[in-house]
Amino acid sequence: MPTKRTAPINKVKSKPAKKKPVSKKKKRKKTGKQRSIWMILLQLSAVGLILFFLFFMAVYLGFTGHVPSSKQLNEIKNPLASEVFSEDGKLLGRYYIENRSNVQFDEISPNVINALIATEDARFYEHRGIDEIALMRVLFKTILMQDRSAGGGSTLSQQIAKNLFPRNDLWVFSMPVNKLREAIIAYRLERIYTKEEILTLYLNTVPFGENIFGIEVASERFFSKSPRDLTVDEAAVLVGMLKANYTYNPRINPEKSKQRRNVVIGQMVANNFMTEAEGDVFQAKPLGLKYRKISYNEGPAPYFLEMLKPELMEWCAHHTKEDGEPYNLYTDGLKVKTTINYDMQFFAQQSVKEYMNNLQKVFDDHWKNADPWRRDASILDRAIKRSERYQKMRKAGKTPEQIDAAFKQSIKTTWLTREGLKQVETTPLDSVKHYLRFLNAGFLAVEPSSGALKAWVGGIDFRFFKYDHVLSARQVGSTFKPFVYLAALENGLSPFDYYPNEKKVYEDYQDWSPSNSHGEYKGFYSMEGALAQSLNTVAVDVMVQTGIDETIETCRRLGIEADLPEFPSLALGVASMSLKDLLMAYATMINGGIRLEPNYLVSITDSQGNVLETFTREAAHLTGLNELNCNIITHMMESVINDGTGRSIRSVYKVQGDFAGKTGTTQNHSDGWFVGLTPQLVTGCWVGAADPGVHFRSIRYGQGAYMALPIVGKFFHKLYRDSRYRKMQYADFPALNNQLLADLNIPPYRELFELDKEDNLIERIFAGKSKDKKLEEMRDPEKRKEKKKIWETIKGIFKKKK
């Protein structure tokens, strides 16, 4: 059966499926969607721009915080500290709210400028207040590369804005609002000020911690020099502090400060302000810190500035600025020049500090573990009531029980000790006891010819002892005796007579009887001898012979206004006077009876150097005291130094030249005094405790020659060793007539038998009278003229006869 043939199957090639054509409707739909996205984006951008514009305008117009106008920025005025200067133009201290002092651009070292630009604003001279490149760099380096050494994104102008106009707290909007506000202010600043002015403004406003502002105060504080003298490494230290004042404070964190300084130097190398080799040299240097804190609380003359403050405040209240407002001592940058001599002030403060530290050790060893007030509980009670804590609690209405409980509760505090400051945890009561044991001091130096104050030290440390012992009134002891002898001369008593050193009972004065400190009663003393040995018996005898009222009258002529008791004990210095008043009375004697008022202000200028007032000293007062008598007393007080209680001035402190003085000690050894006189300086020192009940128990330590004289001795030793003041020791007191000097040159002490053996009766009777007659003629110029006229007449008669 034949096979059925089938037709071959042909492979049919499939054609690609044709795309269905998109309908026009669908095409329009897709295009519309894309447009919608773009429209939304555009709308969002528009909204964003509108919002940014509104945001910008809100900031610009000050709705989010004050934005200063160009006019206000053109009148920027920082609160400036008022400064007090010595007569030689050196800074004594400042009064301030913010411790700030402005400088000019040419008064700033280029090292400071270079360090600042390299670290804070490398493109400072290329932008107009906002550095977009720096912002991008900071974002890149800090976020991506974690490199924080390249500085911040804010320009110096923006930082000025931040420093001068504090940021506002606006919750989540704080950062953008404040940054934009600072950018606006920065832009305005750049339009108003030159680049140099912006650098100066920045360096005058920037804070350095410790409540100090500006490069001048910072350079003085940390390196004891002006900003124009800062070296590269010193400038780098100060610029490095700007990143974090406390962290990079060279006094508090020296190692961190050094590390930061080296980063600044590295930036100066990177920005081509120096070579790498030079940078290595500066980075290897030590910090070289010379820390010196000057305010009115610290510095060389804190007690003087505290005394001066009320007078300056009064002056400000009565003097107005151009805008009609009175001057402000704390913000207007006044410059006050005074009569204080900076070197003398330094020597005085140094002498007080050195000796009082040693004397305090002697006092502590003297009492050992015993309390000096153990026999009188009222002393401690008075000290508690004088304390600042007690006063504040009383003012707050606290009961005695509450105060007592508070004084027995332990607290952390800082004590002043002989070794320095010490952190302790103790009770306020123990703190009162601690400070009650301290001896304190006051020192003053006055130029007698002008009444100008030259040095003023009111205590051992103003931070802990605010009471000024130049102004405090204490019994003056034997420093009063020269006034007694001056009154005697003024009232006709003879300086050539001898006075018995014997115990006397003064029946008219409640049978009172004076005693000598050494307990010896024998022989006869001249006035000069009795003054040199500070004999109480003779001083009282002379005053009673002179008259107590007459003695008080002489004191009034000397300018003493203190209450003077009408009792023989007045001769022993029971009256209370301040060191200042005592020295001005001595100055009147040195001036031959011409009294001058103390003066200490020279001039006041404003912050621009315009003189607001120049002070002239008051006219001299003619006291009616005899010049020769004053000179005789000065001569007698030289014996105190050469042969008497003040002789250690020569033997220990090697003070040469004309020098007179007087020691003083009060009852129970509570007060030690010494007055040291030269032709050009009247100096004095008081030493004692705040409460007279706290004192040494023996005359060995509790006398003026041991407590106070060494401070004056140290002062003159330092002063005369300085070549600038050495010539002062060659000045002379007013010269006495040669005949008078010869007449005064009598033995200071005589025994009774020596007086009895004196040449003969005729000479004993008439020698003293003859001397007194010559002295009277010397005292009275008119009598000398009359005598000379008679003598000339006699000579004329004889000439005619020839």
Image (cartoon, rainbow, N blue to C red):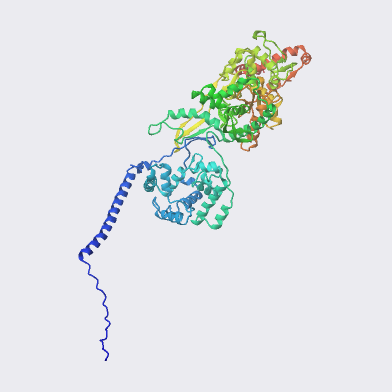
Looking at the picture, tell me which residue is in the foreground, 747 or 305. 305
Position of the N terminus by quadrant: bottom left
Q: Quadrant of residue 293?
A: top right
Furthest residue toward top: 508
Furthest residue toward bottom: 2
Answer above or below: position of 357 versus 26: above
Q: Quadrant of residue 477?
A: top right
Looking at the picture, tell me which residue is in the foreground, 789 or 325. 325
Tell me where residue 144 appears, x and y as whole percent: 45, 56
Looking at the picture, tell me which residue is in the foreground, 672 or 393. 393
Residue at image point 26% right, 84% down: 10
Answer above or below: position of 797 versus 608: above
Q: Quadrant of residue 141?
A: bottom left
Tell me where residue 307 appears, x and y as whole percent: 53, 28
On the question of residue 596 being in view, the answer is: no
Marks counted in the figure total: 0
Furthest residue toward front: 1
Tell me where residue 12 appears, x and y as whole percent: 26, 81
Looking at the picture, tell me which residue is in the foreground, 121 or 712. 121
Answer above or below: position of 251 versus 762: below
Image-based side of 176 in relation to 615, left or right: left
Image-based side of 120 in relation to 769, left or right: left
Position of the C terminus by quadrant: top right
Answer above or below: position of 740 versus 731: above
Furthest residue toward left: 24
On the question of residue 418 being in view, the answer is: yes
Tell me where residue 557 appears, x and y as whole percent: 57, 18
